[in-house]
Amino acid sequence: MYPKEYIQFLVHFNGDRDYFECHELLEEYWKESNDKKKDSIWVGFILLAVSRYHHRRGNFKGAKRTLEKAIKILSLQENSSSIMGLEPNDLFALLSKILSDIDKGAQYQSINLPVKDPVLLQACITECEKKGFIWGHVSSVANSIVHRHKLRDRSKVIEERQEAMRIRKGNE
């Protein structure tokens, strides 16, 4: 019913709070899917994870910018949000509160995406248990997943960006 990558996204988001992994999972899925639009629901969820990653690291400017983009995209996809097993009203109230907290310079706190579909919720909890995570646990700012981007091999990403720039310049 739901893509396995989405379930894994939720497991990491509400389980071990590895927002970098959330981003990686859905970005790969989005790139391989037929829905490569920048306003895809997948992009909204990717940006939400990136915002949480920035906020936890104390990058309030990046957290705000990406959260605002996420809210805009998810608002356009509100019916899809509901279809994706989340409670839209609770989701947008939560995102509004986070945006307000970021504006106030409040320190990062874990949040749980409001999964309303009982089948999806059970699938996520079961997968969490398999991985040794606790669904809904509170994460620490000092844990090892806070600075994961520094460990990433970015050569492929840089290569793709350079190629896209060459193509754009060739079309100008």
Image (cartoon, rainbow, N blue to C red):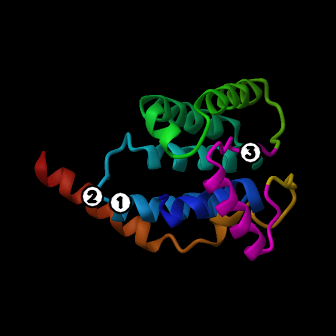
Residue 112, numbered circle: 3
Q: Residue at x 52, y 66 (%)?
A: 4
The earlier-in-sequence mark between 2 and 3 is: 3
What residue is rendered at 62% in x and 28% in y? 92
Q: Are marks 2 and 3 in contact (CB under 8 Å)?
A: no
Q: Going by the image, does 83 lie left or right of 159?
A: right
Q: Amino acid at mark 3?
A: Asn
Q: Amino acid at mark 1?
A: Arg
- Most foreground residue, 106 or 116: 116
Instruction: Give the extent of the magenta segment.
Output: 110-135
Amino acid beneath label 2: Ala
Quick one: SS at disc 3? loop
Q: CA distance from mark 2 to mark 1?
A: 5 Å
Q: Nearer the viewer, mark 2 or mark 3?
A: 3
> Element at badge 2?
helix
- 10 Å neighbourhood of mark 1: few (<14), some, or many (≥20)? few
* Numbered circles on residues, count: 3
Q: Could you tell me residue 17's position as x and y percent?
A: 74, 57
Pointer 2 and pointer 1: residues touching (CB < 8 Å)?
yes
- Asked whether residue 146 is in view, the answer is no
Could you tell whether 4 is left or right of 17 in the image?
left
Residue at numbered disc 2: 164
In the rendered structure, the answer to whether residue 163 lies left or right of residue 143 reads left
Q: Which mark is residue 161?
A: 1
Q: Quadrant of the C terminus?
A: top left
Nearer the camera: disc 1 or disc 3: 3
Comes first in the chain, label 1 or label 3: 3
